């Protein structure tokens, strides 16, 4: 538990002192969102219809942008190796890394959601569903992305490869989350989607760190 | 039994045993492919609704079945490699990935060709098509990781981890895209249920499925033999084997 708190605190501190790494994906997210009305045309009805998909794809891309750096600096300065060699559990360390990644990339995206929804003329029910869906799913994105980040940490340029490895794993949450927003806009019940997304979140919370820890063991084993 | 398993795990023994199996397996596969294809394309009566285009099924359905079970087999080999560190399992994972990706691609292409006359469109964003496409991306991921990590020590284990992660996700992906309204007909082939098509259409399909599997296994085995020769090229037995040739 000490390792968990110490790791999260250190990550937050490091990124607080160098905020650009945290801010860049958020700026990217807003820029991508605002490009769509320019490309498609400013007609509110059309934008409203495709808003959930646009916001979600932009959020996935923004998350993946920050994914590559999850373990990279720790790998390069050797602290990742020290963690693996120490008697501390790698599983807990991975969870700590995922939590700090979520606090620095997932949570700010959730907070940006109302702005994105405003730009695309979503109505109130849609805004709430969109924010809730991202709140439920963004930890899953960090958990699954961690696997890709750990697998590619030993490579000089892992960024694009992470996207290829992780994107297929994001399909279920993307389908369910956009369906949830559309259901909310149509005025129907969304609780079933909430249960599904929570089930996926807890499932990946149990399983994904195992794979990530195994991948870290491989990367530091050379 | 366990002893046999360990012995088969040594590249040299596998190479010797598979050398004896290679020719009969491949000839049986080619024979059944040719026979099944001739049966399906020439002698099966045309469908009352789809006409002759139903014959694409005999190419498409076995590919689609094999695409999925190929991934499961790859994950099985990956698990064997991670648990027992049998090097041959890593060779198997490496050799099956491009094979599975090509079979998945074949399933997608034949599906598109079949979709045009029956649905009137090459592609629909339907549940089964989408999950096959995602399966294709999963294969591509394993291949991409392998080629990016080429010559690094942990490449086999990294790819094995990725294959296992993919196989855990496969059912989730499948069921989540099933939520969409599906244009695709339900599974047309199952061994456990009574066939929904007449027996004279079902039998050639069975032949084709078995032929696809045999072909898959024999090509997989040939690729493994090739890879063994490359990896063990500095050992005495490979040098002797090459000298005899």
Image (tube, coloured by chain):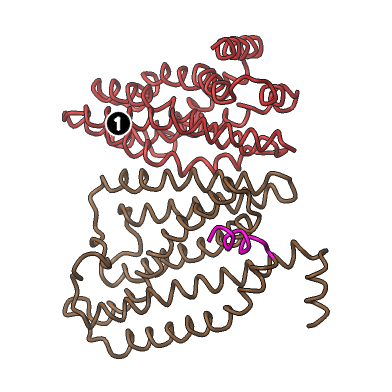
Magenta-drawn stretch contains A215: no
Quadrant in which residue B52 is drawn: bottom left
Q: Could you tell me which quadrant the C terminus of chain A lies in?
A: top right
Magenta-drawn stretch contains B5: yes
Q: Position of residue B22 (x, y in %)?
A: 58, 78
- Main secondary structure type of the part rendered in magenta: helix
Q: Which chain can be seen in brown?
A: B
Q: Which chain can be seen in red?
A: A
Q: Residue at x 38, y 84 (%)?
A: B37
Q: Position of residue B140 (x, y in %)?
A: 54, 53
Q: Position of residue B77 (x, y in %)?
A: 54, 55
Above or below: residue A205 compared with residue B11? above
Which of the two residues, A73 or B49, is positioned nearer the viewer here? A73
To which chain does the residue with label 1 belong? A
Task: Name the residue beneath numbered marker 1.
Answer: A44
Q: Is residue A103 visible?
A: yes
Does residue A30 appear left or right of residue B82 in this picture?
A: left
Q: Position of residue B40 (x, y in %)?
A: 32, 84
Q: Residue at x 32, y 30 (%)?
A: A199
Above or below: residue A210 compared with residue B71? above
Range shown magenta: B1-11
Q: Residue at x 51, y 56 (%)?
A: B74
Q: Could you tell me which quadrant the N terminus of chain A lies in?
A: top right
Which of the two residues, B172 or A157, is positioned nearer the viewer here? B172
Quadrant in which residue A175 is drawn: top left
Q: Is residue A73 visible?
A: no
């Amino acid at each position: 538990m000490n390792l968990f708190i110490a790791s999260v605190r250190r990550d937050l501190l490091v990124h607080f002192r160098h905020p650009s790494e945290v801010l860049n994906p958020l700026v990217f997210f807003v820029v991508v969102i605002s490009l769509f009305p320019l490309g498609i045309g400013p007609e509110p009805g059309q934008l409203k219809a495709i808003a959930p998909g646009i916001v979600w794809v932009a959020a996935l891309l923004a998350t993946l942008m920050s994914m590559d750096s999850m373990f990279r600096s720790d790998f390069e300065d050797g602290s990742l190796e020290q963690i693996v060699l120490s008697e501390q559990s790698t599983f807990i360390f991975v969870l700590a890394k995922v939590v700090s990644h979520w606090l620095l990339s997932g949570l700010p995206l959730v907070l940006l959601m109302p702005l994105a929804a405003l730009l695309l003329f979503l109505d109130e029910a849609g805004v709430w569903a969109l924010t809730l869906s991202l709140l439920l799913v963004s930890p899953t994105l960090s958990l699954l992305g961690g696997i890709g980040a750990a697998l590619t940490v030993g490579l000089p340029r892992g960024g694009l490869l992470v996207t290829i490895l992780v994107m297929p794993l994001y399909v279920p949450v993307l389908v369910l989350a956009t369906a949830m927003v559309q259901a909310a806009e149509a005025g129907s019940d969304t609780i079933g989607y909430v249960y599904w997304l929570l089930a996926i979140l807890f499932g990946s919370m149990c399983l994904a760190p195992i794979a990530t820890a195994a991948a870290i063991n491989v990367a530091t084993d050379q | 039994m366990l002893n046999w398993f360990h012995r088969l795990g040594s590249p040299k023994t596998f190479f010797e045993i598979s050398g004896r199996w290679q020719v009969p397996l491949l000839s049986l596969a080619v024979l059944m492919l040719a026979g099944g294809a001739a049966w399906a394309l020439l002698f099966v009566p045309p469908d009352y609704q789809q006409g002759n285009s139903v014959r694409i099924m005999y190419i498409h359905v076995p590919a689609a079945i094999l695409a999925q079970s190929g991934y499961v087999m790859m994950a099985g080999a990956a698990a064997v490699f991670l648990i027992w560190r049998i090097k041959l399992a890593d060779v198997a994972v490496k050799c099956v990935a491009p094979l599975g990706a090509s079979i998945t691609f074949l399933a997608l292409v034949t599906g598109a060709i079949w979709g045009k006359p029956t649905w009137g469109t090459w592609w629909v964003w339907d549940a089964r098509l989408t999950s096959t496409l995602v399966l294709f991306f999963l294969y591509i991921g394993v291949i991409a990781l392998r080629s990016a990590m080429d010559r690094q020590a942990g490449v086999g284990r990294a790819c094995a981890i990725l294959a296992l992660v993919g196989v855990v996700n496969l059912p989730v992906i499948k069921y989540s895209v099933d939520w969409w309204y599906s244009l695709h007909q339900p599974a047309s082939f199952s061994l456990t249920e009574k066939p929904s098509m007449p027996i004279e259409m079902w039998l050639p399909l069975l032949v084709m499925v078995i032929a696809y599997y045999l072909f898959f296994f024999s090509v997989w085995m040939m690729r493994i033999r090739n890879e063994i020769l490359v990896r063990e090229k500095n050992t005495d037995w490979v040098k002797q084997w090459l000298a005899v040739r």
